[in-house]
Amino acid sequence: MSTWTSYLAGMRERSRRNAPPVLGIALAYLAAATVAELLTTIIEPRVGLVLHGIVLAVLLAHAALVWDQPIHELLLVMAFAPLIRLLSLSLPLAGVPLVYWYFLTSVPLFAAAIMIAQALDFNFRAIGLQVRAVPIQIPVALTGFLLGYMEYEILRPEPLVRSFSLQEIAVPALVLLVSTGFAEELIFRGLMQRAATQVLGGFGIVYVAVVFAVLHVGYKSLPDVVFVFVVALFFGWVVAKTRTLLGVTISHGLTNSMLFLVMPFIAAVNPAAGGQAPAGALTVTPTATATAAPTVSATLPIVVPLPTALPPTETASPTATATPLPTATPLPPTATPVPPTEVPPTATPVPPTATPVPPTATPVPPTATAVPPSATPVPPTEVPPTATPVPPTATPVPPTATRVPPTSTRVPPTQEPTRTPLPTPERSPLLCPQPVVPGRSVCSFP
């Protein structure tokens, strides 16, 4: 143990005597973080993940070796840059709702901020956790409305909620204020800017603004990176002058709320703004309900005529069977003239002709010898034709019943637009996912 302690003490002494320029070290780590972010966003997330891990390990080791030098504060707070990206790529939050994703991701960041503040002996006043210059903080906070509108014109993201109502936006607005606005201002303008200005002087504000802009490369928008850099310079100047995070925290939260909760719906209502209707717009709902009603009622008439068509087919069979009875009796006297004159023209008066059948039933026994020869030809000639037409009338019924499913299958396509998909997290704030790896995501700062 003593050998290891003496080794570390020797390395610290040598590093004190041969200390390279502080600005060069700071720019080297900034370049490494930028390359890792570009690899993660543009080329291959897994390669960027490995490089971010290496940068984080080197930063922590370097800070431990030069702990007795002022640069160790900057090295320790610079670890937040790769740490944020590693958290966004590693936490298994793919199935968690997007709003709660922000909160869950900010929890380890808050824990890391508290630990680093204690390690560097930064009190609340040193990192801007105080209320000062309230008359100046009010206009600074109100700039969030303008900044949110300007960034929406650059990114045009999807909304984080289904509809624009107080119940829908209350919780997301609070989460954006605490988990993105306050968390990011505490890390960058509170801890990182305090350490950078102690080491780099006034250039520390510009250095922190560049780091903040680099973490927005995930949007793949150069205008947004420039816009975020300018906003970071403004926030850093305000904190340096007022020594409080109050105004910039509220402005940051309002910027994200305008960007993801308000402006997507305002742009959808106002066509002059060139906006697109967000997912869940109310204009889709009435079209689906109007088409669904007639399709259901149209199937009812198809089913109703089916029972009415079946009875006529059954009534035709008794008329056909009644004809052979009268024809069988008059065969001996004059068989040929009787059937053509009575049966075809009067199909309806079958009931009246059915009454004379009983009186003629008596002469049948004396002429029993002649009936067998005449009865044999009758069944083959008349009974088959009456039996065969019945199946054809029954067969057309299934085609009418089979037409019902096609009408019902057309209903789902008309109802598809009513499903309001969840907002896609393609462009989202720092603590929000962008799907690039199965089960993982890349995020960027708002």
Image (tube, helix red, strand yellow):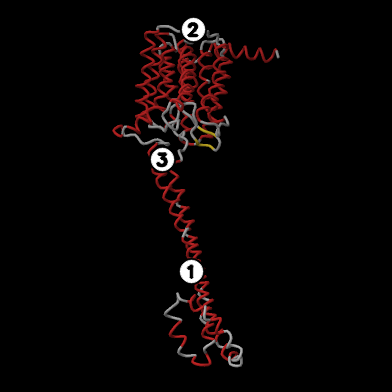
Q: Residue at x 42, y 12 (%)?
A: 239
How far is mark 2 from mark 1, CA to CA?
97 Å
How far is mark 2 from mark 3, CA to CA?
53 Å
- Residue type for callout 2: Arg
Q: Nearer the viewer, residue 370 or 148?
A: 370
Q: Earlier in the sequence, mark 3 or mark 1?
A: 3
- In the picture, the quarter occupied by the N terminus is top right
Q: Badge 2: how crowded within 10 Å, few (<14), some, or many (20+)?
A: few
Indicate which disc residue 312 carries: 1
Residue assigned mark 3: 285
Residue assigned mark 2: 125
Q: Residue 264, image x and y in percent?
A: 38, 31
- Residue type for callout 3: Thr
* Residue at the right extreme, as displayed: 1
Q: Nearer the viewer, residue 156 or 11?
A: 156
* Label 2 secondary element: loop
Q: Badge 3: how crowded within 10 Å, few (<14), some, or many (20+)?
A: some
Q: Residue 149, image x and y in percent?
A: 35, 25
